[in-house]
Image (cartoon, helix red, strand yellow):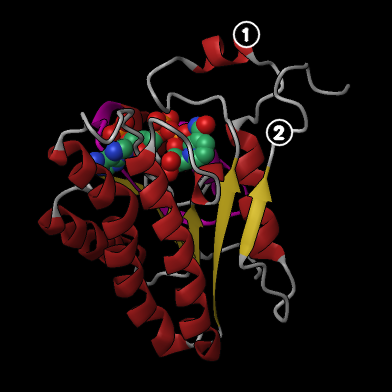
Amino acid sequence: MILKGKKALVTGASKGMGRAIAKALALEGVDLFLTGRDSDLLEKLKENLSKTGVRAAYKAADLGSEKELNDIFVDALEFLGDIDILINNAGIGIKGNVTEMAVTDWEQMFSVNLKAPFMLSRLAAREMIKKRSGYIINVGSGASQTPIAGFAGYCATKHGLLGFSESLGLELRDHNIKVSIILPGSTATHFGGASPENKLSARPGILRPEDIADSVLYLLKQSDVAWTSVMNLRPLNPKTSPLK
Ligand SMILES: NC(=O)c1ccc[n+]([C@@H]2O[C@H](COP(=O)([O-])OP(=O)(O)OC[C@H]3O[C@@H](n4cnc5c(N)ncnc54)[C@H](OP(=O)(O)O)[C@@H]3O)[C@@H](O)[C@H]2O)c1
């Protein structure tokens, strides 16, 4: 895909991987519609991205709400005029053993991590099918394949997202639309509550958000005939500093 002039919707863009992905896409000349809940962070990012010469706008909204999900897509399409790339990146992980987990925590994780990608993918795919082109990239996790005690709910959503992503990819390939899922290992973001700085000082070799952004660009730039359905992205060695 030649990226310059393409139009992308990125969820979870206010921080972490989503912000890094948005920055990387802007540097490639992609116009962006950003979502997250923190409007101050989204406003700052929008201002920064606009300096690269691309068009950028945002909507602060809760992906846990079906109505807000629809509104995000309507506003994105109105602003961008079209959609070439959907990045389903937003996600939450609430720790808790199954015996103690509140049903509302379970439901919240399923809404943000699984229902939102389903809702946004179906809306985006309908537009992409009309023009026989587009790319949907989901952000899963190592937890899409690996069980983790104390994270059954999170693992269930991310295992589900892997199955969803691969099945959707099979549905859409005949429409010339690619769907991929990236499964990152530990990454220095705000995910789970600790600061990126604290995570890096404890485990200096974990991934940086920019590593996930690089992977997104790699997928988008792959040849038209090649389709990477699942990309496992691991830190080379989480405990040690990266090679110089
Ligand atoms: N960090 C890791 O070690 C790691 C490893 C594997 C996979 N992942 C996955 O990577 C993705 C990105 O996470 P991250 O590490 O970048 O975490 P992060 O820094 O905590 O960012 C999460 C993003 O998701 C958004 N978000 C969360 N709940 C939302 C909601 N209800 N409505 C709208 N937006 C919501 C947040 O927006 P606001 O804060 O503005 O609400 C934020 O922009 C997630 O899917 C996560 O599961 C992370």
Residue 174 shows in this picture: yes
Q: Position of residue 182 (x, y in %)?
A: 58, 53
Q: Is residue 99 left or right of residue 157?
A: left
Q: Is residue 104 above or below residue 208?
A: below
Crowd band around label 1 with a 10 angstrom C-alpha radius: few (<14), some (14–19), many (20+):
few
Q: Is residue 29 magenta?
A: yes
Q: Is mark 1 within 8 Å of ligand 1?
A: no
Dividing the image into four quarters, tell me where ligand 1 lies. Answer: top left
Crowd band around label 2 with a 10 angstrom C-alpha radius: few (<14), some (14–19), many (20+):
some
Q: Is residue 195 magenta?
A: no
> Which residue is painted at 50% across and 89% down in the image?
175
Q: Amino acid at mark 1?
A: Ser
Q: Which mark is residue 129?
A: none
Q: Position of residue 81 (x, y in %)?
A: 34, 70
Q: Amino acid at mark 2?
A: Pro
> Which residue is painted at 65% across and 15% down in the image?
203
Which contiguous range is marked in magenta? 16-40
> Which residue is painted at 47% across and 75% down in the image?
167
Residue 146, by quadrant, is: top right
**Which image quadrant: the C terminus?**
top right
Q: Which residue is mark 2?
A: 235
Which residue is nearer to you in this view: 98 or 18? 98
Q: Position of residue 82 (x, y in %)?
A: 38, 72
Element type where label 2 sits in the image: loop
Residue 61 shows in this picture: no
Q: Which mark is residue 201?
A: 1
Q: Is residue 221 above or below residue 134?
A: above
Q: Is residue 11 left or right of residue 215?
A: left
> Which residue is painted at 21% across and 65% down in the image?
74
Element type where label 1 sits in the image: helix
Q: Is residue 50 above or below residue 69?
A: above
Outermost residue to the front: 99
